[in-house]
Amino acid sequence: VIPLGWSIGLSAVLFVIGVVGVLVRRNALVIFMSIELMLNAANLAFIAFGRHLNDVDGQVIVFFVMAIAAAEVGIGLAIIVNLFRLRETVFVDEVNLLKG
Amino acid sequence: MIPALFAAFAAILVVSSLMVILHRNPVTSALFLVLAFCALAGIYLLMGAEFVGMVQIIVYAGAIMVLFLFVIMYLNLQKDVETGVQVALRRGLGWLLGAVLLVEGGLLVSKAWAPRPTEPGATVPAVGNTEQVGLALFSDWLFPFEVIAMVLLVAMVGVIVIGKGLRASREGR
């Protein structure tokens, strides 16, 4: 019912919005949210192709991606909180040292 | 009816994701991201992926975004200051690169790349969507499922270690 091209086009637009967000923002938290947008664009493509091929495997992979995203968000936010404790900033261009 | 709903959800999705990257206040960005995830869940429902749509709302809009909001409010962030030549330059470059990427994607999509349907016409499955996903998950995908469980465990341990902080880990507490 929904053409495959629409879903893939929407997924591409969503991914590009995520990429632009990573490139233009300085706030580490917003960069992180943009990464979530890109993950969701990939999820949408998986669901669309799974629907197109009449296969449930696409939905299973999306389930795995969500689990990975949850793990990633936990670790990433812990790192950002630690960064804020050390540097009092979440702006990525003010953080230029590898050694704390 | 379904194409109209798809278009409406897609419009909400694109506008709210744009607001995520354009708004200065991180809390507002996070709330728009919740809206985007809910619209995406609606699109999943339209595509017949009911289980994934519900998990999207519970895990993404519920758990992950609450964690984001918690951290934003814990750090007590104010509105981002985005001034200066360097920042403006980077923003212009970012939008330019995004436009190039979008054109590239459009060219790829317009080519004849789509695989043909393996079965003509959508066959109606004998069982519900959740049951289908569960059957696939615990038969063909059992090993990846166990690996994901280990990944989540390792992530949990990692978060605890990182969250304790540098000084605490140096002192061996």
Image (cartoon, coloured by chain):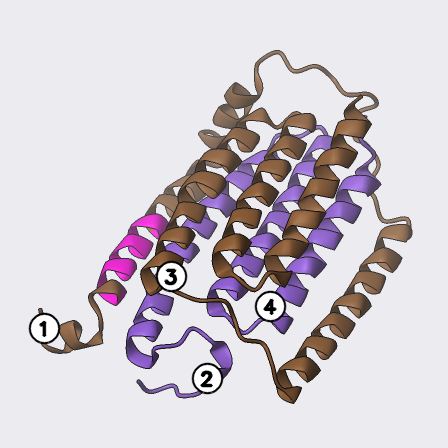
Which chain is in purple here? A
* CA gap, disc 3 and disc 1: 23 Å
* Protein chain holding label 4: A
The image quadrant that residue B144 belongs to is top left
* Amino acid type assigned to the residue bearing label 3 in the image: Leu
- Dot 3 or dot 4, earlier in sequence: 4
Left or right side of A9 for B160 = left
Left or right side of B171 for B54 = right
Q: Which residue is mark 1?
A: B172
**Residue A94, numbered circle:** 2
Q: Residue at x 63, y 39 (%)?
A: B40
Question: Residue A74: x, y in percent?
Answer: 36, 55
| Same chain shared by disc 4 and disc 1 | no
| Same chain shared by disc 2 and disc 4 | yes
* Amino acid type assigned to the residue bearing label 2 in the image: Glu
* CA gap, disc 3 and disc 2: 18 Å
Which circle, 3 or 1, is nearer the viewer?
Answer: 3
Dot 1, crowdedness within 10 Å: few (<14), some or many (≥20)? Answer: few
Dot 3, crowdedness within 10 Å: few (<14), some or many (≥20)? Answer: many
* CA gap, disc 4 and disc 1: 36 Å
- Does residue A35 sit above or below B58 in this rendering? below
Question: Residue A30: x, y in percent?
Answer: 52, 63
**Which secondary structure lies at badge 1?**
loop
**Which secondary structure lies at badge 3?**
helix
Q: Which residue is mark 3?
A: A77
Q: Residue at x 56, y 31 (%)?
A: B53
Question: Residue B120: x, y in percent?
Answer: 83, 23
* CA gap, disc 2 and disc 1: 29 Å
* Protein chain holding label 3: A
Dot 4, crowdedness within 10 Å: few (<14), some or many (≥20)? Answer: many
